[in-house]
Image (cartoon, helix red, strand yellow):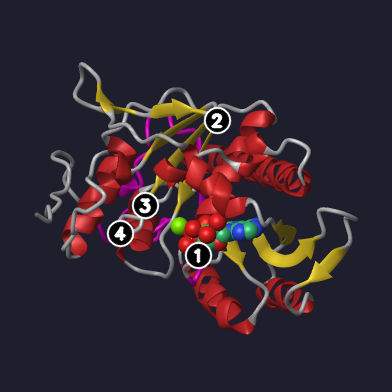
């Protein structure tokens, strides 16, 4: 018999706010314990978002950070499989879910609580509710960074997150072909529209590294993604080569960065991790500056009123 999944019980859904502060900014409530929230997005499915999200999480962990990973791909959750966290989610005394910890990553995914064969006939409000709960009904430990694996496109999940959660920045994954980059541009436009910092674009599966001689063979036109990044005024974060072992590693639940510490992809993911850390640090400096300016302006008006 096919099961029909119900969303988790709990948090109510609110909406109609954005990150600019020109609407009701109070609705952008911090997520306790989550640290800096980094979205991994794409326009198109199958370009490697989940692979990049999981391996970026492992790379950031390797670089010394405490990392969480939230699987926001409600209809196609991959994180549990990629990390090998097949088990359910424990529930703490306060009723919140406790993330699974594997490979040093604290993760939650709907795949941890739903049977694989469960149909999910969820319309927008239920999707929004599930997303909200994945952020807020989870007892995140004190994380430095929460990486969020998004579904493809610019739909309910993306909008719910952008309207409710303070996001440090987003990275956009694409393969270097027009079919994929045209949708990546739509994703970039959505983030621009919500004033979300875009840390940059990642080019995935653009070239093949020969395991025998290390020679690099381009699989697509290498210039395509750089042009998209230039056109959108966002950084080109470089590329992750095609790894023939990726699907076997995915099925085994061991991320490439963990399984192949000397493999060709590890350097690429560590490099990506360092760039994401630098982008977060830039965001934090900008935030501190804006707060200082806010204080200075307030002091200015208070002095003026006193005089
Ligand atoms: N760099 C890579 N090398 C080889 N295969 C990859 C790479 N990145 C992703 N894949 C494969 O491509 C497929 C789609 O990847 P996935 O991460 O699930 O994409 P998305 O989350 O965007 O739908 C999977 O089979 C995955 O193993
Ligand atoms: Mg995915």
Q: Is mark 4 within 8 Å of ligand 2?
A: no
Q: Does residue 168 appear anywhere in the picture? A: no
Q: Which numbered dot is residue 144?
A: 2
Residue found at x 31% / y 55% = 74
Spatial CA distance of label 3 from label 2 is: 23 Å
Residue receiving disc 1: 191
Q: Earlier in the sequence, mark 2 or mark 1?
A: 2
Q: Give coordinates of residue 124: x percent, y percent.
A: 21, 64
Residue found at x 46% / y 41% = 305
Spatial CA distance of label 2 from label 4 is: 27 Å
Residue found at x 29% / y 49% = 131
- Asked which secondary structure carries label 3, the reply is loop
Q: Is mark 3 within 8 Å of ligand 2?
A: yes
Q: Give coordinates of residue 271: x percent, y percent.
A: 76, 46
Residue receiving disc 3: 77
Q: Which residues are magenta?
A: 15-44
Q: Does residue 61 appear anywhere in the picture? A: yes
Spatial CA distance of label 1 from label 3 is: 22 Å
- Asked which secondary structure carries label 1, the reply is helix
Residue receiving disc 4: 75
């Amino acid at each position: 018999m096919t099961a029909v999944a119900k969303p988790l019980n709990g948090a109510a859904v609110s909406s109609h706010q954005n990150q600019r502060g020109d609407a009701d900014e109070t609705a952008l409530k911090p997520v306790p314990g989550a640290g800096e929230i980094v979205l991994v997005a794409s326009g198109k499915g199958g370009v490697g978002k989940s692979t990049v999200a999981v391996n970026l999480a492992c790379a950031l962990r390797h670089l010394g950070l405490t990392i969480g990973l939230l699987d926001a791909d409600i209809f196609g959750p991959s994180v549990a499989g990629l990390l090998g966290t097949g088990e359910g989610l424990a529930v703490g005394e306060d009723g919140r879910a406790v993330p699974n910890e594997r490979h040093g990553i604290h993760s939650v995914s709907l795949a941890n609580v739903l049977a694989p064969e469960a149909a999910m006939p969820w319309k927008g409000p239920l999707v929004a509710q599930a997303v909200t709960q994945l952020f807020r009904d989870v007892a995140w430990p004190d994380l430095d960074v929460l990486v969020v694996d998004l579904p493809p496109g610019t739909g309910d999940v993306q909008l719910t997150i952008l309207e409710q959660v303070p996001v440090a920045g987003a990275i956009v994954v694409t393969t270097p072909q027009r079919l994929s980059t045209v949708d990546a541009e739509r994703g970039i436009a959505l983030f621009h529209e919500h004033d979300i910092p875009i840390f940059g674009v990642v080019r995935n599966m653009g070239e093949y590294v020969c395991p025998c001689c290390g020679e690099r063979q381009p699989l697509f036109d290498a210039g395509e993604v750089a042009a998209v990044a230039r056109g959108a005024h966002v950084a080109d974060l470089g590329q992750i080569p095609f790894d023939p072992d990726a699907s076997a590693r995915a099925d085994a639940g061991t991320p490439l960065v963990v399984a192949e510490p000397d493999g060709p992809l590890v350097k690429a993911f560590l490099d990506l991790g360092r760039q994401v850390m630098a982008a977060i640090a830039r965001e934090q400096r900008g935030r501190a500056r804006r707060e200082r300016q806010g204080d200075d302006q307030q002091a200015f008006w208070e002095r003026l009123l006193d005089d």
